[in-house]
Image (cartoon, rainbow, N blue to C red):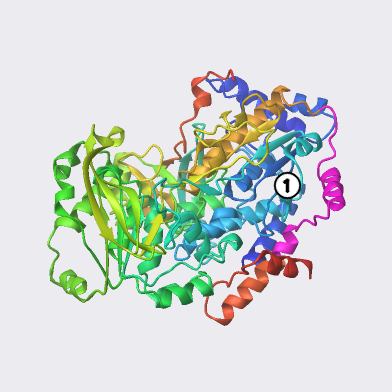
Amino acid sequence: MSGHKLLFSGLKLWTSGSCRWTGRHHDGVNRRGKAASFSSCSPKVCIVGGGPAGFYTAQHLIKARQDVEVDVYERLPVPFGLVRFGVAPDHPEVKNVINTFTQTAKHSRCSFYGNVNVGKDVSVEELQQAYHAVVLSYGAEGNRSMGVPGEDLAGVYSAKDFVGWYNGLPSCRQLSPDLSCETAVVTGQGNVALDVARILLCPIDILKKTDITQPALEALAESHVRRVLIVGRRGPIQVACTIKELREMVNLRDTRPEMMAADFEGVTEALKDLPRPRKRLTELMLKTALETPEEKERERRNKASRTWGFRFFRSPVEILADPDHKRTAGIRLAVNRLEGSGDASRAVLTGEVEDVTCGLVISSIGYKSLPIDPSVPFDQRKAIVPNNMGRVQQAAGLYCSGWLKTGPTGVIATTMNNSFDTARSLVEDLDSGTLVVSAAKPGSQSISALLDKRGVKPVLFSDWEKIDIVEMKQGEAIGKPREKLLTVEEMLLEARK
Amino acid sequence: MALVTALRRLAHLRLRENTRMTAAVTSSTWLSGHRSFTTGTQSLRSDNKVTINFINRDGEKISVKGSPGDSLLDVVINEDLDFDGFGACEGTLACSTCHLIFDEDVYKQLGPVTDEEMDMLDLAYGLTDTSRLGCQICLTKSLEGVVARVPESVADIRQSQDGSS
């Protein structure tokens, strides 16, 4: 059988014009059968981080070579990373990728080890000793701060924490955001900012059928927030969000849009030169901001009890405190003008400022990766692990995928391609002998022993499935797809049963 | 529910790993297994089938048959076609990975595109004026023999390096 495959791959090598020997699209057929017969043992790969990047990298590796074994280590007892803790509760279809990850995790050549903190319970160096290759895909758990006075006041949160809170991330359980004010300001205009605005204004009868956590649901049911401003440094043509999310805001029940016509000066003229995706997005924004709606829509807007809007050319310079200096009372925004055009345009201060009354500020200006192990090179400026096509620079046998590799932007499909790319680099290195696999490595055997000695008990995929069943059962009882367990302790309790 | 589906797929997977047959087409989408999003109306009469020709990312032409009513994504899955990362959101208009490109005359035949499809299509790499999402196109007899090209999903730096990495 393998001989037949070799013949086929041999034919492929000679018939395809360009040098596609890298096996980019011949995953599943071992293109370098020769190398396979030399390597006396199966390559063992360790992946750090059980989110989309980790699972997509594993998927590709397992498919590309029949001899690779992959172990995925995850800090939390539960897998799936931002698909579980980042994707908005009212976007359940986006979470369908979990089915693919589950297949990968249950593959005979893949093992999941949750509840293992790499960098604390075990070092990257120890992993490198136990495995032929280590792929870092632990994402971005930090966030960019606005760096303005008052950022530490009560009432100011990062979008990362706010999203983590309503999605049940254990470390965000105690956030208790103050929703007693009328106006909330979100800084940043990407899809996360729009998710935050939408969840703040979404009718409760819609939210209560999602997997949003019960405490968040209850807090939002009591919320006094009726107005959300989504503030960006630059103009309408520079927004980072995409049209699906904008359309959802425009169509959000019981809300009406409220924008400044002056912000859209010159935008209509610029439309004709824009590529289709940007053009459609800008057209929708223009229509929403400037056009007089027809009667039915006008009526709907008049009846709406909540408002939302973009505010452009504004940068936060200070969070203003109430007289007692205890909580947020407003935000001071510097007024900008644009220099240059399109993607390359820059916001330049004009010297003017504007104060906006608000009691809640959520900064959604980017997640940020953090270094987890001193032995791993880390670019502090870009906040990524320096790499070339997923190969960590100056570190043989070390790779990275996902946001840690490229920075924290992009949807799941972006991460998928990014992870496939790293897997291809790794497979290339296996095929070419750059990654030496002539000596067998102990893999999870030695790491399990090490963890055991240190009192760390990994959660296996079958253990996660127990948690999964409990969450779905809990959810069913109250008309939700699942009711998430909110603490690591509860997760471990179910996992050990 | 996800658990049962996953278990079903796993059983199928193990079976297939043991009896893998080399095909003219590179190895099947082992992950997709027998997922089908239609109600499984598999007609026994072969003349009810519609032939679709996919051009994969290597330029190979793959001819398969589907039933009227199946979406092109259904066909890719049912026929185990090996397109990396195709159909990530399982046909729910939450991604752009089932992106397909058609000839102009075929594109016109496919009919109007909803805003929802266009919104996701806008995110696809290598978007063209004759691009569509495979999960939104349903087979009819009039689509007999059409050609659908699977485009690259990302700019591949590798190709410009002429194989020397």
Which residue is located at x 87 percent, y 51 percent? A453
Which residue is located at x 85 percent, y 52 percent? A452
> Would residue A413 be seen by someone viewing this image from the given angle?
yes
Residue A338 position within the rendered picture, expressed as x and y whole percent measured from the top left? 23, 37
Q: Quadrant of the N terminus of chain B?
A: bottom right
User: Which image quarter: residue A492?
Assistant: bottom right
Which type of secondary structure does the marked residue at label 1 adopt? loop
Looking at the image, is A80 positioned above or below residue A388?
A: below
What is the chain letter for disc 1? A
Residue A4 position within the rendered picture, expressed as x and y whole percent measured from the top left? 73, 32
- Is residue A460 located in the magenta-colored stretch of the structure? yes
Q: Quadrant of the C terminus of chain B?
A: top right
Residue B150 position within the rendered picture, expressed as x and y whole percent measured from the top left? 46, 40
> Relative to residue A287, is residue A125 drawn left or right?
right
Residue extending furthest bottom? A477
Looking at the image, is B93 positioned above or below residue A385?
A: below
Q: Report the amino acid beneath label 1.
A: Lys
Magenta range: A438-465
- Is residue A487 located in the magenta-colored stretch of the structure? no
Looking at the image, is A266 positioned above or below residue A94?
A: above
Residue A61 position within the rendered picture, expressed as x and y whole percent measured from the top left? 67, 39
> Relative to residue A56, is residue A186 drawn left or right?
left
Q: Residues within 10 Å of mark 1 (few under 14, many from 20)?
A: few
> Would residue B33 be seen by someone viewing this image from the given angle?
no
Residue topped by disc 1: A120
